[in-house]
Each structure stands twice: as C-alpha cells, then as structure tokens.
Image (spheres, rainbow, N blue to C red):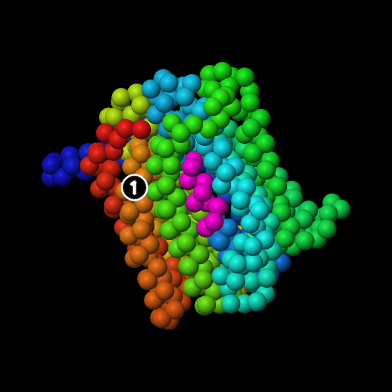
Amino acid sequence: MSAISERFGKCVSTWLPHTSLSKDVLRLATPVTLGMLTFTLLSIVDTAMLGRLGALPLAAAGVAGVLYFAIVFPISSMSVGTQSLVARRFGEGNETQCGPILNTGLMLCLFLGLPLVFATPWLARMIAPLSSNDPQVIEASGIYLWYRLLGSPFMLINSVSSGFFAGIGKTKHQMVSSILITVTNIVLDYALIFGHAGFPQLGIKGASIASSIALAAGSIYYIAVLILPGYRSRYGVFGRPWFTTRWLRPMVRLSSPILAQRVLSNGAWAIFFAIIARIGTVELAATNVIRSIFHLSIMSAVGLGTASAALLGQNLGANRPKRAEQLAWESVKLATYAMIVVGLLFVVAPGFVFRIYTSELSVIAAGRLPLMLLGPVQVFAGFALVLSLSLQGAGNTRFVMGVEFLCVLLYLPTVYFLGLHTSLGLLGAWTGEYIYWAVLSVAMIWKFRTGSWKTIKL
C-alpha cells in the first residue's frame, strides 16, 4: 500500500508546477497569450458582428477566412525561422546578428507579399468558387477575400516582427500590437459593417476592409518600435546589409517545412469547410463559429508553445540543453491545466459559448453537440501544440511537417466518411479532430523524449 501511495505521490508531484520554471515560462507566455487572445478577437469580432446579419454572411466570411489563411498563413512561416535563428544568436550572446536576421525576414515579406496584392483580383475570382456551391455564398466570399488579400503584406510583416521579439524575449510588443489591431478592428467593424459614425453600410465588405486596416496599424506599431535607437545599435535592426544569403539559407531551410505544414493544415481546413458546405448552409455557419471558438481555446497552448520555443532556442544557444528540456515540459504542464478548464466549459456550457457569437437559434442548435465533442480534444491539442512548437524552435521542423502530413491523411477521409456518408452529419465531421490531435500529440511526445533535438545546429 505504501508503494502505491509513494508512486501516486510521485506522479502528483511531477504534474505540480515548478515555481522558478513556471515563472520563466509565464514571463514570456503571458504577453504572447494575451496578445494572441486579443488578436484572435479580430476574427471573433467579424464573426459576432456578421452573425447579426444572418447565416449567409456568417458562412461566407467563415469559409473565405479559411481560404485567406490557406494562402497567406503558410507564407508567414518565415516567422518560425526568424524566431529560431534570433533565439539561438541571443542565447549565444551574439546580439548584433539578430537584426540582420530580422532584416532578411522583412525583405522576404515584401518579396512574397506584394505579388499577392497585385494578384488579388485574379485570386479572389479563382478561389471564391471553392467556398461553396451556393451562388450567394460564392459572391459574398469573393468580396471578403478581395479586401483581406490586400492586407496580406501587413500580416507577414507582423508575423516576422513578432518572431524577432519572441526570440529576444520581449514578447510584450506582440501583446501591444495585437491589442492595437483588435481595438482598431472593433471600431472599424462597428462603423463599416453597420454604417455608423457617418460611414457607409458595407456589410461583409466592411468587415474585410476593417481587418486589413487593423493589420496595417499593427505593422506601423512594430516598425515604430524597431526604429528606436536601442534596437538599431544593440541588435543591428535596419542596418546594412538589408538582405544577406548568410541568413537567407538557414531561414529558408527552417521555414520551408513549416510552409509545407501550413499548406497542408490550411488546405485541410479548406477541404473540411467544403465538405461541411455540402451538408448545408446552417451547418457551415455553425462550423465557422466553432472554428473561431476552437482557435480561441487553443491560444493559451500556442502562447506557451511560443514561449517554450523561444526559451528552448535561447538555452540551446547558451549550451544549457537540460534546462531547455525542463522549460518545455513545464510549458506542457501549464498548457494541460488551461486546456482542461476550457474543455470542461465546452462540455458543460456549449450553448452559452455559442450565444456570444450568434443569436441564430438554428446555428446554435446545429453546433451545440459538436462543440461539446471538442471538450476532451483540448488536452491532446495542448500536448501537440506546445511540443510541436518547441521542436520547431529547436530547428526540427521537418519532423513536425512529416507528422502533420500523416495526420491530414488520416483526418480528411474520416471527416468525409462520417460527415457525408453517415447520419452523424456535422457531429461526425468534427469527430475527425480526435484522430488528428491524438496522433499528433503521441508523435510529438515520442520525438521530444528522444532528445535528438538537443544536437541540432542552427
């Protein structure tokens, strides 16, 4: 009996927070998480306000948003390469090389982002028909995509800049930028969607314009901070050379697998939405709300994973691999606590959560059970997100991409079969999340425990 008690006590103590480690993690993770939570409100505000206009604009904005991120989010993978390289140089004490890494990342943003702006009319016409088989949804999605794509360079600049600040441990700037973006978006959404304060009533078009202008406000903030003399002298920000192959090659090597991973992930989301569109417009609107809720729910894990990646990179650069590992596992523990709380909320009060986004009773009824289903998934997602981001921070981006490919291969057939070929419908389609997150979490735990990431050189 004493042996069982001893084993139980050891298990409990393993999962209790370690004060000094938790303090280091939360110092970086709290601003990142708060920033991501407020930044996620950019999507939530669009969803909530458009939900007041009915199911059609809600469905159109949701699927168009997925298509937008399927295009732009993979390119923002440069932020991962930027953060990993900056964190290593910062940990080594080689701070003057952090700026040239950022410079290279920002130049890549312009090189890749500006063509998106010029191709916006063509892209909107080509991609909008993928959103639905409903002509009204297609038309509304095309309008939304058009104006969101115009703001794509600002999203890329924000991503790379946040990667730089995370790498040097100054995550508060990500929080401030995200708050600025969110406040700007809320004000402009209110004015442009409904036609208040002397502005025209633009509906879904106004929502997309507001989002792009809000992203521009975030970029202005980042640039205003980066041109301060302290950053230019200490880190070499905006100094010459503006673009160097010394950092271009490792950035591309680190970021390319993440780009492929994000193409897979966002492509899977786009296909998922296309499958839901075949079930019905109300189900599509409910799925848009669930997606927004789910993205908000995982922000704590993403924030902790981002902090873990930065601390891991810094400690590997300082030749402290043991502490890097301890900090990563501490991040996993903290994420698990947060995800359990969120998961319980989904199970106990799904209707309450749904009503924050929409008052449409048909949409709430369609999404109630799928949201409850996602409650237990939160724990798997916490493990998967923190450890995958930690491995990326160490430079092991290819493994994460490979596992993502496997998960998508298992996920999409499950969604297709259960969603369209059984009576489960929308509930069956969302069941695929169990396959995706369970496989991803098990693979990340196994890889991290091997310790092979400790020897990667950047």
The amino acid type found where label 1 is placed reads Arg
- In the image, 402 versus 297, the foreground residue is 402
Residue 422 position, x and y percent, is 40, 81
Which residue is at a point 33% across and 54% down the rendered structure image? 402
**Rendered position, 199 above or below 128:** above
Query: Could you tell me which quadrant the N terminus lies in?
Result: top left
**Rendered position, 436 above or below 278:** above
Is 400 within the magenta?
no
In this rendering, position of residue 379 left or right of residue 454: right
The answer to which image quadrant residue 54 occupies is bottom right
In this rendering, position of residue 166 left or right of residue 192: left
Residue 206 position, x and y percent, is 74, 57
Is 74 within the magenta?
yes
- In the image, 263 versus 416, the foreground residue is 263
Residue 342 position, x and y percent, is 46, 52
Which residue is at a point 63% across and 23% down the rendered structure image? 228
Which residue is at a point 67% across and 61% down the rendered structure image? 121
Residue 353 in view of the camera: no
Residue at mark 1: 398
Query: How many neighbours does mark 1 have within 10 angstroms: few (below 14), some (14-19), or many (20 or more)?
Result: some
Q: Main secondary structure of the magenta part?
A: helix
Number of numbered tags placed on the structure image: 1
In this rendering, position of residue 121 left or right of residue 455: right
Query: Could you tell me which quadrant the C terminus lies in?
Result: top left
Which residue is at a point 65% across and 57% down the rendered structure image? 120
| The magenta segment | 70-79
Residue 400 position, x and y percent, is 35, 49
**Rendered position, 330 above or below 238:** below
In the image, farthest residue toward the right: 198
SS for dot 1: helix
The answer to which image quadrant residue 159 occupies is top right
